[in-house]
Amino acid sequence: MTTAGVREVAPPAAPQAISEQHLGPSAATQRRELWRFWSLVLLFGLLTASVVFALVLHQALRLGGVRATAQPHQADSARGTIVDRNGAVLVADQYFYEVSVDPGQLNQDEDRQTVATALEQLAGLPASQTIDLLRSYAERRYLRLARAIPLEQGERILAEQQRLTEEQGVHPLTAVTLTLAPQRYYPEQSLAAHLLGIVAMLDGATWLRGVYGVEGYYDSFLRERDGVRLTRQTTQPFTQLPTQVRRFLPSLAGRDLVLTIDRGVQWIVEEELQQALEIYGAQTGSILVMEPQSGAVLAMASAPTYDPGAFAEADPALLINPAISAQYEPGSVFKIITAAAALDSGVVTATQILTDSGSIAVGQRVILNSDRAGYGPVTMAEALARSLNVITAQWALLLGEQQFYQYIERFGFGKVTEVDLAGEIYGLVKQPGMLNWSLSDLGTNSFGQGLAVTPIQMANATAAIANGGRLMRPYVVAERALDGQVQVTEPTVLGTAVSAETARQMTDILVEVVEQGNQAARVPGYRVAGKSGTAQIPTQEGYTEDETIVTFVGYAPADAPRFVVLVKLERPDPAISRWAGRTAAPTFSRVASRLLRYYGVPPDATRLGQQPTGQ
């Protein structure tokens, strides 16, 4: 865990739970350094917040109700259907009738009353409201009385118009026009809400636009015939898609998306996340599941969440996806990156012994271990299992500032991952030459303090180790169907973070970390690689005493990773536990256990023909 500005005493640790902390020099010095850093964070945050605020402010957060407009309205065009990787519908158009009228054809109050009464009887539109609108906008040639009424009510109006026309020839109700109009429908309600995004009316517009998530990123494609072009893609006939995926495709719009998301995995993740919030008393949380070999996102969940079909009733702050749009100090999970960089550069070896004296001075800061103890000679695996800040800082010093920050960039920190979701933000990494950077930052950054990441950045960096050192571009859309053709997203390698040999060594080390330091993350029958991190929350006055953000990131099976899982919980109840090893780690274990069963992955002993490991 990482802390500064406050002396802490770690709680007595059970054998399977190793605390993660450090203590800086004087409180005054820490507060000054912290203030310099967080002034940059505040500036970045204000810029981000202003964009988000403007976006939310300019949304008309309602889809129904009566709305008058001065110009003739063209009904919203159909949008494409969005399905998961197995063809389960996550978003589709549901059709309604829009009700409009030409007020110029209703010059008499008697005619207005006739229309208002008929619409109330046939469609439940309040007669008094309709009369007020007809009188107020009597000079207009177009007036929308209802954006969306059910098809059944619309059919009743059409039938009544036909009857009156046949019997009377001309009738005031014939001034009413019904237009078939689509509206977004989310059959799974809140499932994957943050990833999917919403469709909203923007101020001054006469059509709906996708905002956030997939709906926002692929808005042009879903409602038009052009739009986003992927980094790499191939084209094949629509019939090449598996039959199961084509069950509900193509849509009427003829432009549809097949996601990498697995509905079953998403459901498991959301259930476990909600249980974790309840068990540990955490306020918010996120869980990501990725396929390391391709970068495909299998699940992405955050809580609390909302129903995209009724987003107007939700707190606007909930619409933002924390997995890609919220940055935080990762704490000791970041030691994975420092250790990998030290190994890959050759400044240390996996078996090399370094001495932990219990403290180390880096620049103007003295770094201590969480329990204020020294552990003497230790290997890399032992240092990570005990989460020793002193040894991690030594690795950073051996790397030197130039190499250290080069590796951070190679792992994708300080920039966006390029995931195809609207709203992704950069992380925040100070580097030599930047304002307020000092040598002490090298030490604290090494164990995840004084820099900020997003959950998807941390998950993707860990996935690079699980993928033999190759950093992939995360993506959520597997195929785009258009006009009988399918554009298939090809996995994209963003770069090489570390060598394949370094990645293999790091996997073995992270397995030992789970076995010796994060035993609550173990999955019986499988070798699991991973690490926990507990970070206190920084404020202008210093780091909070009890409020923490806990993370565990890992992958399984370790030798042939099927998935990478990141668990992040914010502000767990300190009366229960504020440590990642006792909150995020067991949550990871539950998620990984269910996913291994879901995918039918045999235990290591069966799969590899080995004796049981005893896990």
Image: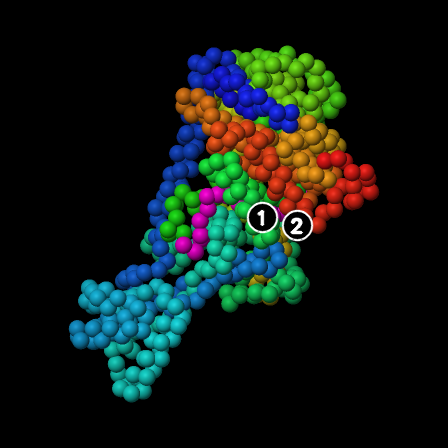
- Which residue is depicted at the point 43% across and 64% down? 182
Display colour scheme: rainbow
Total numbered labels: 2
Asked if 499 appears above or below 486 in the picture, the reply is above
- Which residue is depicted at the point 64% across and 12% down? 357
Residue 105 percent across, percent down from the top left: 23, 75
- Quadrant position of the N terminus in the picture: top right
Please name whichever residue, 166 or 37, is drawn nearer the observer in this view of the structure. 166
Which of the 4 image quadrants contains residue 374?
Answer: top right
Asked if 51 appears above or below 3 in the picture, the reply is below
Q: Can the viewer see residue 190 in this picture?
A: yes
- Which residue is depicted at the point 44% across and 21% down? 542
- Label 1 neighbour load within 10 Å: few <14, some 14-19, many 20+: some
- Quadrant position of the C terminus in the picture: top right
Residue 493 appears left or right of 170: right
Residue 498 percent across, percent down from the top left: 69, 32
Location of mark 2 (residue): 598
Residue 110 percent across, percent down from the top left: 18, 76
Residue 526 percent across, percent down from the top left: 72, 39
Do residues under tags 1 and 2 come within 8 Å of each other at their CB atoms? yes
Specify the amino acid type for callout 1: Ile
In three-dimensional space, the C-alpha distance between marks 1 and 2, rounded to whole angstroms, equals 9 Å
Of all residues shown, which one is farthest toward the left? Answer: 109
Please name whichever residue, 9 or 33, is drawn nearer the observer in this view of the structure. 9
Comes first in the chain, label 1 or label 2 = 1
Residue stretch rendered in magenta on the structure: 293-310
Q: Can the viewer see residue 140 in this picture?
A: no
- Which residue is depicted at the point 46% across and 43% down? 304
Location of mark 1 (residue): 268
